[in-house]
Image: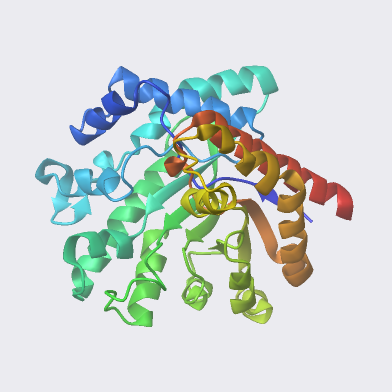
Amino acid sequence: MDITFDDIGSYPLPHGVNKRVQQAFAAGDVQAADVTDAIREVMCQKIAAGIEVPTYPQFQDMNRQFLRIINDPDKIDKPFLVKDSCAEIIELSAIESVAREYFKENKERLRIRVCVTGAIELYLNQFGSTSYTDILELYARSVDRFVRNALHAKSSFEVAVISIDEPSIGVNPEIMFDDDEIIHALNLSAKSSRVDTQIHLHSPINYRLACESDAINVVGVESAANPDYLELIDKEDLERSDTFLRVGVARTDIFGMTAELNELYQVNVWKETSRLSEIVTSMETPEVIAGRLKRAYDLFGDLIRYAGPDCGLGAWQYQDLAQKHLVNTGIGISEFRRSVS
């Protein structure tokens, strides 16, 4: 058994800089000091929480982060195809100093997870319910250029995992492409990847598309908030296609959890915030998280390669609450490992 603790990416902004950082991103000023400081601070928090393969902090909108570049006429070879030299994820530059410090302290390189918004997601954002396969292919080739540059850049960290983020697959009825076209886009999107390549889905209904992709070898399942999702996956499909799972073992649906607290105490916990801490002290405890991982392991065994929160924590608002949730997740995964060792 070798299950790695990772995370999805998004995270609350530091208190006091929210508006300035959001304005900087909106203006395209992604090199602003507030932005890079916030990225470094959160990366340190993730490492301190025990994440073994942390994702760079995502403060940008997942579509705008890449479309800002792809839609810039000065940064493309032709419409929808980004220039190799411009396919840059600025967050990776921002965490360089964190990675160097990590190496000094641990005598090994920091292993990270890099997420790139997938071609289907980018296409839907720009074209909605149409099916221009030539444009989808160009988006997929652009995605792969971001992947390739992330893997090949000289840096102090090691890219251990690539994630292609496609939350609309299996959810959005506007997708007009057929299965073969989606699989082809997935293949092109991570053609250059030579590391574990996840697909981040919000529903596993169409997980078989990922199993049929030559470029994807890990399917992400948000199974903490939706435990029945695991029952939608056939273990034989995974074994036949040599595909593994990333299972969500900690809930991130903050509004669902606070609604439960509101009903329990008949208050608005966003106004009476003293109750918010119960999310990490009573609801999402290490014991609960370890139990979820055990259930998933009972079903899929060593086909589980990664575990962590369902999705990102950007909506959580308070960094101390988000970090405690990550700490609990790490403890829960460790407790499960000890129980089966």
Whether residue 293 is visible, yes or no, is yes
Whether residue 10 is visible, yes or no, is no
| Quarter of the view holding residue 36 | top left
- On the rendered structure, is 212 left or right of 53? left
Q: How did the renderer colour the structure?
A: rainbow
- On the rendered structure, is 228 left or right of 215? right
For this orientation, the residue located farthest to the front is 266
Residue at 34 percent across and 33 percent down: it is 90
Residue at 14 percent across and 44 percent down: it is 72
**Looking at the image, residue 268 lies above or below residue 324:** below
| Quarter of the view holding residue 190 | bottom left
Residue at 49 percent across and 35 percent down: it is 272
Q: Position of residue 165 (x, y in %)?
A: 42, 57
Residue nearest the viewer, comparing 330 with 136: 330
Residue at 17 percent across and 42 percent down: it is 75
Q: Position of residue 315 (x, y in %)?
A: 43, 43
For this orientation, the residue located farthest to the left is 73
- On the rendered structure, is 284 left or right of 252? right
Q: Position of residue 328 (x, y in %)?
A: 69, 40
Q: Position of residue 265 (x, y in %)?
A: 58, 47
